[in-house]
Amino acid sequence: MPLDTNASTPPVPSGPATPESLVALAARLLDGRTIHKGRSVLGLTGPPGAGKSTLALHLVTEIDRTHGPGTAAYLPLDGFHLANAQLDRLGLRQRKGSPPSFDAHGYVALLRRVHTERFTEVYAPGFDRTLDEPVAGRHVIHPHTRLVITEGNYLANTDAPWSAVRPLLHELWYVATADSVRDERLMHRHVAGGRTPEAARAWIDGNDDPNGTYVKEGLAACTRVVEVGCLPSSGAGGSVP
């Protein structure tokens, strides 16, 4: 069920945004039932370390606080990482987080269910950084949920199967963060996850940076560019340790 996304329109630029202004922008989509019927789906994309998961969880928390629990729901692409056993089988363990390391078809199928299954709970997988594995059913989308916020690296990319994602999103925001800031965040993330500084640098240079370059190619498909200011840490911090 393709949406009229106007994806060819250049994205609306944005300067540094306040947390309150971003919540207000997302809350506009709560009126989706009167505009296009059914739930609204907001996508957040951007390169590794941009702050996508932190922003998504902040938006869900604040919308639920002001409009009632379950009004918004979180659906992360990271829940569709292939299990480590599958990555080993495919020879992708050292490219975890790259496009082929995800079950992209499964992610698209769940987005379609978000639109069509309105009267039952829809469960979405998450990612457990301690286990370093996806976990089934970590997040729930209730029948009364009006806004689903999904985030991930490749939501705007045009290569199949990622090209099937954009038509399922009512809006897609590109989370813009300076490369130097992202690099610092990624170093902290990987060292905190157990890598030595040398191994963290090698992972960033050989995996995160190439993935980020690919993500940036999808900017034109986004409806808005947001520069996130200071947000409370979600503790999510991306999926790959």
Image: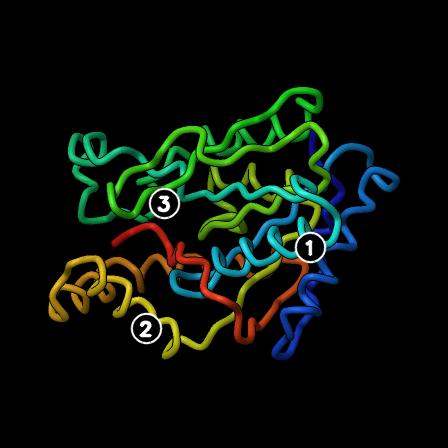
Left or right of residue 132, residue 179 in this image: right
* Nearer mark to the viewer, of 3 and 2: 2
According to the image, label 3 marks what residue? Answer: 99
Residue 224, how many percent across, how many down? 66, 63
The numbered disc on residue 183 is: 2
Query: Which residue: 28% across, 38% down?
Result: 133
- Which class describes the residues within 10 Å of circle 2: few (<14), some (14-19), or many (20+)? some
- Mark nearest the camera among 1 and 3 is 3
Name the residue nearer the viewer: 45 or 79.
79
State the separation of the CA atoms marked 3 and 2. 20 Å
Q: Amino acid at mark 2?
A: Asp
Residue that carries the numbered disc 1 in the rendered image: 8
Q: Label 2 vs label 1: CA separation?
A: 30 Å
**Is the C terminus in the top left, top right, bottom left or bottom right quadrant?**
bottom left
Alpha-carbon span between mark 1 and mark 3: 23 Å
Labels 3 & 2 near each other (Cβ < 8 A): no
22 relative to 32 in the view: left or right:
left
Residue 94: image x %, image y %? 18, 48
190 horizontally vs 228: left or right: left
At x 63% / y 42%, what residue is drawn?
148
* Circle nearer the viewer, 2 or 1: 2
Which amino acid does the dot numbered 1 rest on?
Ser
* Rendered residue at 34%/70% (across/down): 185
Above or below 223: residue 81: above
Residue 194 disc label = none
Task: For mark 2, give the secondary structure.
Answer: helix
Query: N-terminal of the two: label 1 or label 3?
Result: 1
Identity, as a three-letter code, of the amino acid under mark 3? Pro
Residue 46 locus on image (x, y percent): 48, 60
